[in-house]
């Protein structure tokens, strides 16, 4: 286990992250007392399930129609 103080952790964060990713245990201490432990993040590897929002979301027929008043604003004109 590697113990570093807060100042060293601030200046060497990238290096410490690489060490944690390589499997090393890193603890950050404040005033000589262990405060936090860095751990590698492991994302869940679950397959995506489609259709979760089926029949829960709907759009109106004019969803992609831009109203004239909004068009003039985008073109730089005030309404």
Image: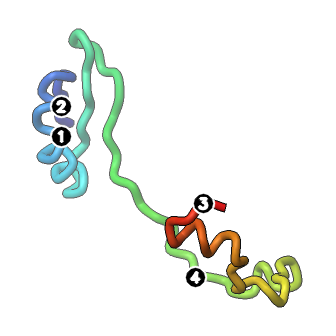
**Quadrant showing the C terminus:** bottom right
Residues 74 and 52: in front is 74
**For residue 78, which numbered disc appears in the image?**
3
* Residue farthest to the right, as pictured: 55
Measuring from the top left, give residue 60's x and y in whole percent.
Answer: 84, 84
Q: Residue at x 25, y 27 (%)?
A: 28
Q: Are marks 2 and 1 in contact (CB under 8 Å)?
A: yes
Q: Earlier in the sequence, mark 3 or mark 2?
A: 2
Q: Residue furthest top?
A: 31
* Residue identifier under label 4: 47
Disc number placed over residue 13 in the picture, else none: 1
Query: Which secondary structure, mark 4?
Result: loop
**Res 9 quadrant in image:** top left
User: 48 or 62: which is nearer to us?
Assistant: 62
- Is 60 in front, or is 73? 73
**Helix, strand or loop status at disc 1:** helix
For the residue carrying disc 2, how many other residues have a C-alpha within 10 Å: few (<14), some (14-19), or many (20+)?
some
Up-down: is 69 above or below 4?
A: below
Q: CA–CA distance between discs 3 and 2?
A: 53 Å
Residue at mark 2: 9
23 lies above or below 45: above
């Amino acid at each position: 286990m590697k113990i570093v103080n807060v100042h060293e952790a601030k200046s060497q964060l990238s290096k410490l992250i690489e060490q944690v990713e390589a499997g090393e245990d890193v603890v950050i201490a404040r005033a000589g007392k262990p405060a936090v432990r860095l751990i590698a993040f492991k994302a869940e590897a679950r397959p995506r399930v489609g259709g979760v929002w089926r029949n829960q979301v709907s759009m109106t027929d004019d969803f992609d129609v831009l109203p004239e008043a909004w068009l003039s604003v985008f073109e730089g004109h005030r309404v």
